[in-house]
Image: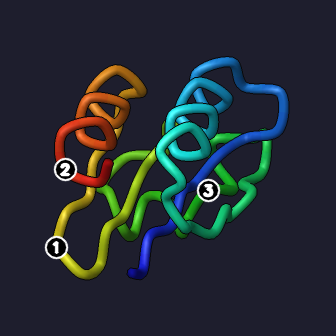
Amino acid sequence: MSITLYALDGCPYCETVHDALEAHDVEYETDWVEGLHSERDEVKRVSGQRGVPVLVDEDRGVTMAESEKIVEYVETSLA
């Protein structure tokens, strides 16, 4: 499974997603992003926006933002 989470250290929304992934034993990599929105080119490239968290599930062709939607996806599709 090839899942990447784009996250910012100290971001409570990112931590919520990390917790959901861990709780459901989902294997994933974290790509830590810069604090400045203007330096989040990789996030912009994969998601069309610079906010985090962003989850990319390459196996299923899914890219999504917003922690609530990501947690729901983790619980319904990856658990």
Q: Nearer the viewer, mark 2 or mark 3?
A: 2
**Which residue corresponds to mark 1?**
60
Q: Residues within 10 Å of mark 1 (few under 14, many from 20)?
A: few
Callout 2 amino acid? Ser
24 up-or-down from 20: above or below: below
- Of the numbered discs 2 and 1, the one sitting upstream in the chain is 1
Q: Which mark is residue 40?
A: 3
In this rendering, position of residue 76 left or right of residue 1: left
According to the picture, the residue beneath numbered tag 2 turns out to be 77
Q: Determine the residue positioned at 42% across, 27% down.
A: 67
Marks 2/1: CA distance?
Answer: 10 Å
Q: State which tag comes first along the sequence, 3 or 1.
A: 3
Residue 63, image x and y in percent? Answer: 26, 58
Indicate how the structure is coloured in the image: rainbow
Question: Residue at coordinates 36% horizontally, 64% vertically from top-left?
Answer: 56
Q: Earlier in the sequence, mark 2 or mark 3?
A: 3
Position of 16 relative to 33 (above/below): above
Question: Callout 2: helix, strand or loop?
Answer: helix
Image spot of residue 18 (x, y percent)? 62, 39
Residue appearing at x 82%, y 38% in the figure: 9
- At 44% from the left and 48% from the top, the residue drawn is 54
Q: Amino acid at mark 1?
A: Arg
Q: Do the CB atoms of the residues marked 2 and 1 lie less than 8 Å apart? A: yes
Q: Judge depth for marks 3 and 1 and give the one in front.
A: 1
